[in-house]
């Protein structure tokens, strides 16, 4: 067993910023990530971020990722890649599995004084006839193929779901050279921002509301060949006899995300089901600390929002850790955290942010 | 057939020049150095990675980031390798996996 002052699990926007904020105040920080490269999902986000200038709006996710990696290096954050945190055991012990699937794996136990869980979220799937056929995939998988591996996931694609992920990935698939035949939305209204929807509509991609997929058809040798879609009624049930068929080779699912909170639950951190934030998640206070002292949570694993919020939550956790380890005076820490909280509140405005703000405030109140 | 993206309006020239050779079910294919096995397969028109144990149904890429394990294949004799998060190496031998796969004798 080895010992570390602070261990951050997950090197996405939340984990990187938590590690940076703690390390820049002289904490000894180990950041672990399962991927070959740090950055989480930032390097597939080739679009410009939203928000005000204080939130670095207008900057692409890929560029924010590069800056964070440089900062982490500058402040001496130790980074272990290809490392999966497979368990969190009592008294803050982390089980880590090292190496790729085709190599010999080794295990390590790390005892940490402070832990940040920044494991992100996973895509929700929706089940329909034929949904396991090759060619049906998460929107995130298609985005990874196009933007990271630079391989088209398909030629003719149908997107299921019109939240921001569905809309943005549809646009990015067009940019990569694929044809997106349409975006389906079961709700009567488009789920994501109007600006993203307008972009793909201008590019000629129709968005069909009150419509769902009922079947993916294909064969065992080639995978998907057709998508059967159907209008839904007021109770979201398919209206029989109204089926339409699209000839597509790929169907991508953008049906929301849910927090990856298994590690927090495993350690006994109190969790609750918060639908506005994606489902089950560990509760946290204003320092992003869970009900178990010394275990913090940040980013999508603390409730699904977007990358800017994840960055800010990570910073909060990082500053709070530096404070509790005695690297920064509590007066100074308070003023830094207040500044961050002002920016976070600014990200939770408007019709899309309000329900998240309300949910987060309710979570924090449970601690008072 | 899916294709490589070589010229991208945001990312610019994404052409990958260095190549490695791998074998997939006995067929030689060209992959780009450092890319994931699943990406190389996709670029070569292969999108079935395995068949399930009970119903023998085909499976392909689903999450693309190592979470779902649908893309598992037998690599250099070792089954259950997640091809979406495992990079290609020169001379790598990749096989479609049936069921849970079987560890081959030459596995080190």
Image (cartoon, coloured by chain):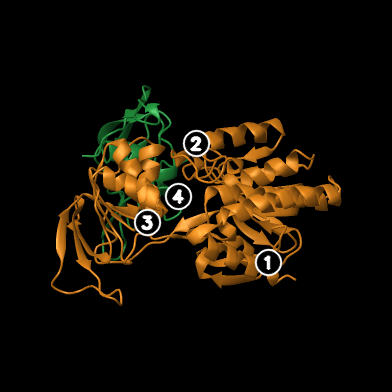
In the image, residue A41 lies at what x, y percent?
Answer: 49, 45
Residue that appears at 72% across and 57% down: A287
Q: CA distance from mark 2 to mark 1?
A: 32 Å
Q: Which residue is mark 2?
A: A62
* Residue nearer the viewer, A28 or A328: A328
Q: CA distance from mark 4 to mark 1?
A: 33 Å
In the rendered structure, the residue with mark 2 lies on which chain? A
Q: Secondary structure at mark 2?
A: helix
In the image, residue A22 lies at what x, y percent?
Answer: 74, 44
* Disc 3 with disc 1 on a shared chain: yes
Q: Which mark is residue A241?
A: none
In the rendered structure, the residue with mark 1 lies on which chain? A
Above or below: residue A367 compared with residue A202: below
A114 displayed left or right of A359 = right
Q: Earlier in the sequence, mark 3 or mark 1?
A: 3
* Disc 4 with disc 2 on a shared chain: no
Above or below: residue A258 compared with residue B108: below
Residue B4 found in image quarter? top left
Name the residue at the bottom extreme.
Answer: A235
Q: Which chain is green?
A: B
B98 displayed left or right of A224 = right
* Residue nearer the viewer, A292 or B27: A292
Marks 3 and 1: CB-CB under 8 Å? no
In the rendered structure, the residue with mark 3 lies on which chain? A
Residue A25 found in image quarter? top right
């Amino acid at each position: 067993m080895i010992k570390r002052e602070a261990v951050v699990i997950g090197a996405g926007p939340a984990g990187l910023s938590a590690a940076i904020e703690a390390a820049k105040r002289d904490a000894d920080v180990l950041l672990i990530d399962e991927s070959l490269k740090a950055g989480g999902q930032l390097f597939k986000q080739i679009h410009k971020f939203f928000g005000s200038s204080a939130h670095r709006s207008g900057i692409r996710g890929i560029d924010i990722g590069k800056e964070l990696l440089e900062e982490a290096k500058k402040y001496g954050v130790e980074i272990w890649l290809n490392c999966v945190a497979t368990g969190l055991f009592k008294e803050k012990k982390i089980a880590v599995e090292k190496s790729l699937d085709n190599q010999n794996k080794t295990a390590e136990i790390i005892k940490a004084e402070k832990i940040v869980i920044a494991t992100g979220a996973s895509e929700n799937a929706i089940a329909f006839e034929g949904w396991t056929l090759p060619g049906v995939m998460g929107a995130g998988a298609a985005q990874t193929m196009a933007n990271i591996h630079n391989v088209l996931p398909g030629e003719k694609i149908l997107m299921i779901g019109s939240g921001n992920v569905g809309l943005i990935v549809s646009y990015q698939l067009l940019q990569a050279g694929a044809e997106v035949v349409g975006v389906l939305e079961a709700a009567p209204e488009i789920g994501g921002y109007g600006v993203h929807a307008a972009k793909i509509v201008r590019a000629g991609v129709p968005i069909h509301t009150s419509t769902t997929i009922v079947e993916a058809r294909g064969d065992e040798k080639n995978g998907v060949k057709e998508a059967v879609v159907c209008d839904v009624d007021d109770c979201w049930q398919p209206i029989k006899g109204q089926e339409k068929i699209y000839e597509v080779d790929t169907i991508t699912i953008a049906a929301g995300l849910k927090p990856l909170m298994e590690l927090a639950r495993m350690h006994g951190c109190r969790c609750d089901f918060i639908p506005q934030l994606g489902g089950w998640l560990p509760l946290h206070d204003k320092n992003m600390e869970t009900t178990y002292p010394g275990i913090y949570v940040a980013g999508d694993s603390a409730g699904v929002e977007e990358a800017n919020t994840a960055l800010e939550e990570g910073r909060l956790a990082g500053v709070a850790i530096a404070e509790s380890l005695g690297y920064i005076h509590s007066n100074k820490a308070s003023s830094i955290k207040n500044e961050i909280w002002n920016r976070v509140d600014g990200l939770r405005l408007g019709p899309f942010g309000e329900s998240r703000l309300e949910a987060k405030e309710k979570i924090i109140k449970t601690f008072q | 057939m899916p294709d490589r993206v070589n010229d991208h309006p945001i990312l610019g020239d994404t052409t990958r020049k260095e190549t490695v050779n791998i074998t997939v079910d006995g067929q030689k294919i060209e992959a780009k150095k450092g890319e994931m096995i699943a990406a190389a397969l996709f670029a070569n028109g292969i999108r079935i990675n395995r068949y399930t144990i009970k119903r023998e149904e085909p499976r392909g890429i689903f999450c693309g980031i190592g979470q779902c394990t649908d893309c598992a294949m037998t690599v250099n004799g070792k089954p259950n390798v997640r091809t979406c998060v495992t990079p290609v190496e020169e001379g790598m031998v990749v096989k479609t996996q049936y069921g849970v796969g079987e560890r081959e004798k030459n596995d080190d």
